[in-house]
Amino acid sequence: MPIHPIRRTRRRRSSAPRTADADPGYAKDLELILNGVIFGFLGRFTEGEIDVTGIVPGIERTVFWLTAAYEEKPVNR
């Protein structure tokens, strides 16, 4: 494992993404949705509509509901 240049410690490998075993179409759609959500939150922040502290909780709620829906009842296309 590479050593982080600032911390001088070894990086731990993150666990596999939740979409690793998901349908590739679902993973691609999820990426598209999350990109839109993230850009939306950033745009709302730059316009002064929300505080910076509202960005991460909003993204977390989005990921929770999208993944919870998939885990409960995956849709076959």
Image: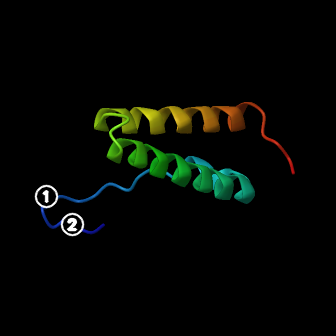
The amino acid at mark 2 is Ile
Q: Residue at x 15, y 67 (%)?
A: 5
What distance separates the C-alpha of mark 1 from that of mark 2? 8 Å
Q: Is residue 44 left or right of residue 16?
A: left
Residue at the far front: name it. Answer: 47
The residue carrying mark 2 is: 3
Give the residue furthest to the right: 77
User: Which residue is painted at 35% across and 42% down in the image?
Assistant: 45
Tell me which amino acid carries mark 1: Arg
Residue sitting nearer the eye, 41 or 66: 41
Instruction: Report helix, strand or loop for mark 1.
Output: loop
Q: In the rendered image, which quarter is residue 58 located in?
A: top left
Q: Quadrant of the N terminus?
A: bottom left
Against 26, is 2 above or below?
below
Q: Position of residue 53 (x, y in %)?
A: 30, 33
Q: Circle 1 sits on which residue?
A: 7
Residue 9 appears left or right of 24: left
**Front residue (pair 42, 13):** 42
Which of the colour schemes (rainbow, by chain, secondary structure, one colour) is used?
rainbow
